[in-house]
Image: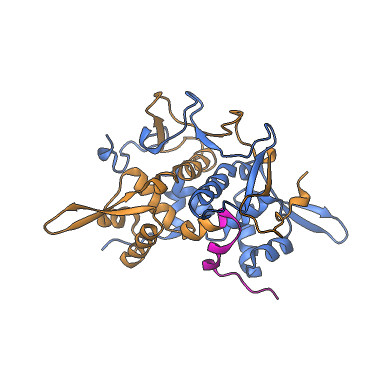
Chain colours: A orange, B blue
Amino acid sequence: MLAVMKWDELAHEPCSMARTLGVLGDRWTLLILRDCFLGVRRFDEFEERLRIARHVLASRLKKLSQAGILAKMPYQERPRREEYRLTQAGLDLYPVIVGLAQWGDRYLCGGQGPAMQRRHRLCGHVLDAVLTCPECAKPVIAHEIAVEAGPGAAKDFAVPFARRRG
Amino acid sequence: MLAVMKWDELAHEPCSMARTLGVLGDRWTLLILRDCFLGVRRFDEFEERLRIARHVLASRLKKLSQAGILAKMPYQERPRREEYRLTQAGLDLYPVIVGLAQWGDRYLCGGQGPAMQRRHRLCGHVLDAVLTCPECAKPVIAHEIAVEAGPGAAKDFAVPFARRRG
């Protein structure tokens, strides 16, 4: 009988995705981040949008702040009021948010299409973003990727299930 | 006092990202998917890798199958044994997985770098994938995207917080 993994242990897994989920994997956290990218910044606005219990919202915002994803910034001095803004680390999560949204656009919207779309201001087109290799400019496709030990791997580290990849 | 949102209601939100999280947002589900992309296919392998309770694993695999992300395929006839394989819809989640992993590579690995890296077989380079607009070939940056009503929006639908965007 194997010991069951605790969620907090993810931070120590030799896998960046597991570590990221240790920070973001709570069910509400990614929805809070979605709202941040829509421009939501204040506690009461998050509460109204998400219909989430105040103590749950407070703990998730605290966790995101401690992780350096959101920063608390004053927007009023007397009385002092603060709002939550995405840091650069937070803004760098945008590909994850867009990836989740585009998958839903494709598979969960039925025939009528999505209720919201993203427009790329730089070129004016509706965005259907593609994950791309900057070296060869080709789209990234799962079957064309090999996972291998990286620079931070322990000496005895073997990529799980690498034997199966051909 | 607002009614608290139930997780199951996400499927009916006019937001593709919320709907996707309704399918994937459970804390273990994205870790199961990560393992699928590493080549894990069999129940006992998932159990060993994730150290997750069998009934939890069974329910998550069932949910992923019902959502059309995994397909159960026989790999042995007598006795009949089945394994879980990514469908095309499942494979299309790869950008989300890579996005989560790359963010962790950047922010959660300390100085020594990640334990695992991805190599793009097409061109031979270590992958540092970039979300790109296929129309103008520029990287997608959060501040350069405008969210607007899409083709599936109800007549009275207004993009939340659109007033705040410049």
Image quadrant where residue A134 sits: top right
Residue extending farthest right:
B78
Residue B2, x across and y down, in percent:
28, 61
Residue A10 part of the magenta-drawn span: yes
Q: Is residue B132 visible?
A: yes
Residue A142 vertical position relative to residue A68 in the rendered view, above or below: above
Residue A15 part of the magenta-drawn span: yes
The residue located at (36%, 38%) in the rendering is B154
Residue B21, x across and y down, in percent:
49, 52
Relative to A34, is B72 on the left or the right?
right
Residue extending farthest left:
A78
Closest to the observer, B85 or B151: B85
User: Quick one: quadrant of the N terminus of chain B?
Assistant: bottom left
Residue A76 vertical position relative to residue A139 in the rendered view, above or below: below
Residue B78, x across and y down, in percent:
88, 59
The residue located at (64%, 49%) in the rendering is A150
Residue A135 vertical position relative to residue B51 in the rendered view, above or below: above
Image quadrant where residue A43 sits: bottom left
Q: In this figure, what is the number of numbered marks? A: 0
Relative to A150, is B41 on the left or the right?
right
User: Quick one: quadrant of the C terminus of chain B?
Assistant: top left
Q: What residue range appears in magenta?
A: A1-18
Relative to A75, is A116 on the left or the right?
right
Closest to the observer, B120 or A122: B120
Residue A48 vertical position relative to residue A7 in the rendered view, above or below: above
